[in-house]
Amino acid sequence: MTDVSAPDVAALLLRLALGVTMIAHGWNHWRGGGRVEGTARWFGGLGLQPARLHAWSSIAVELGAGALLLAGLLTPIAALAVIGVMTVAAVTAHRPNGFFVFRDGYEYVVNLAVAAVALGLLGAGRLSLDDAFGIVVNGASGGAVAAAGVVAALVMLAVCWRPGRLAETAPADAPVEVS
């Protein structure tokens, strides 16, 4: 391994913070209070259709992106996934509540998305599997890959988001999860 620089350590810290956060978020949607059924009910209430598919997709993307970030593997694609999920969350769940997180606003999810863009620009750094395998995607190309998460989220929203319309939900007795 060559010399580790401050940007390498910065990339590692960003990857660890985002990776752990995404794994915890995905785990909570899967195994937390409302489990998948509660997550599906919540997503259905937001207008995401089919709600159960979106619940499982969110779980898979959050757990997968988190694991990739921790390993520093395919980092721009993992950043793209974080940006996509956070964009959907910002638009569907948090936008109506304003900016501040204490009012369930979009402050938190936007900061996670911006950190993912920064990681796409910075790259995984030398302390990563990307470096070990010679995968170097950073700068403008890494940022562009990561930022494509916004496009993916907007396409998904255009196809699957029907706010104000009753969506497929989990059984009525399933606990409702709040994220």
Image: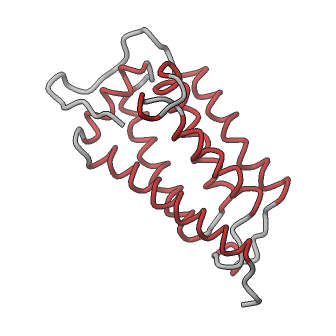
Q: What color scheme is it?
A: secondary structure
Q: Is residue 148 left or right of residue 33?
A: right
Residue toward you, 176 or 30: 176
Q: Position of residue 163 (x, y in %)?
A: 47, 13
Q: Residue drawn 46% across and 26% down?
A: 93
User: Please, is residue 96 above or below residue 58 in the view?
Assistant: above
Q: Position of residue 9 (x, y in %)?
A: 66, 74
Q: Residue drawn 54% across and 28% down?
A: 99
Residue toward you, 100 or 140: 100
User: Please, is residue 8 above or below residue 80 in the view?
Assistant: below
Residue at the extreme right of the image, as rendered: 140
User: Please, is residue 175 above or below residue 166 in the view?
Assistant: below
Residue at the extreme left of the image, as rendered: 173
Q: Position of residue 170 (x, y in %)?
A: 26, 27
Q: Residue drawn 48% across and 27% down?
A: 94
Q: Position of residue 88 (x, y in %)?
A: 54, 32
Q: Is residue 102 left or right of residue 124?
A: left
Question: Quarter of the image containing the C terminus?
Answer: top left
Q: Residue drawn 59% across and 68% down?
A: 13
Question: Quarter of the image containing the N terminus?
Answer: bottom right
- Number of labels in the image equals 0
User: Please, is residue 138 above or below residue 3 in the view?
Assistant: above
Asked which quadrant contains residue 151, the reply is: top right
Residue toward you, 34 or 95: 95
